[in-house]
Image (spheres, rainbow, N blue to C red):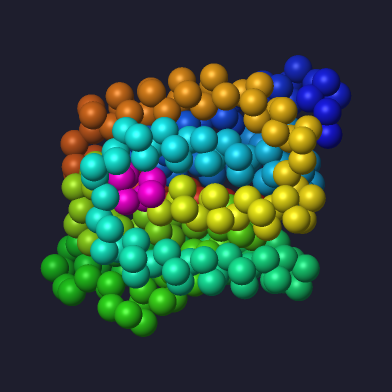
Amino acid sequence: MSPFELSEIQYLYIGLAALLVGFTKTSVGGVGILAVLLMALAIPGKGSPGVLLPMLVVADIFAVVFYRRECQWGVLVKLVPLTLVGIIIGYFLLDIIPAQVFERIIGVIILIMLVLEFIVSKTGKKKFDGWPITVLVGIFAGIATMIANAAGPIFGIYLLQMGLAKKEFVGTRSWFFLLLNVFKLPFSANLGLITVETLKLDLMFLPAIVIGAIIGYWVLGLINVSMFKWLIRAASLVACIRLILF
């Protein structure tokens, strides 16, 4: 895939996707699903994840730099090893389960988690962070991120019901996805999704990622905790609808 074979509208879609990737990593999150859609429009087929993944890694690095002191490491210690196992499982499932079928399964799981999180927030019941749920969330998030780049809503809802402050939420999420996305790189390269040409394309849109990350950091400072929670829920619902219906 050569950058010079793309049309102007494809360049526009990729630029907007890069901007959204930077924004979503340092801000509320959720709009990343729009970046996935835009990238798929620009580069149909299996090529889009190979362009998107290095962009995500770069944006994750910016988010970690911005929120490096705001992380709940206990959450990562529990979830990251399980999620890495999920990524390996997802790697082998890529040729077994059609992506569209699995996306619908992910959408249903996100919807169930949203309902549970809402019940927890309204009734004050115990958080669903016991080991059985943690194992399921960790492994399923790994499979989802490998197959459909859709672990964000799953992990977001899990963090949301833990009652973290907004910067702790974003900081923990940032470290989590940096580790995951770096771990995914060799798998994607082995599948032929990441090549020298896709990396050249990523480099062209690095400024858009940086601008998006800075805007996202600024926007997060303007949002209060209550609005932050509702925006996370709304973004997760949008992702859910997209995965189930489209």
Left-right relation of 120 to 81: left
Left-right relation of 62 to 187: left
Residue at (24% x, 45% y) in the render: 70
Residue at (48% x, 66% y) in the render: 83
> Magenta residues?
170-175
* Prevailing secondary structure of the magenta residues: helix
13, above or below 158, in the image: above
Left-right relation of 147 to 228: right
Left-right relation of 105 to 67: right
Q: Position of residue 160 (x, y in %)?
A: 28, 56
Residue at (83% x, 34% y) in the render: 1
Task: Look at the image and tell me whether residue 69 can be seen.
Answer: yes
198 in magenta: no
Which sits in the foreground, 230 or 202? 202
Q: Quadrant of residue 144?
A: bottom right
173 in magenta: yes
Residue most extreme to the bottom: 132
Which sits in the foreground, 58 or 155? 58
Which sits in the foreground, 240 or 208? 208
Residue at (76% x, 17% y) in the render: 8
Q: Position of residue 233 (x, y in %)?
A: 35, 51
Q: Position of residue 221 (x, y in %)?
A: 23, 29
164, above or below 130, in the image: above
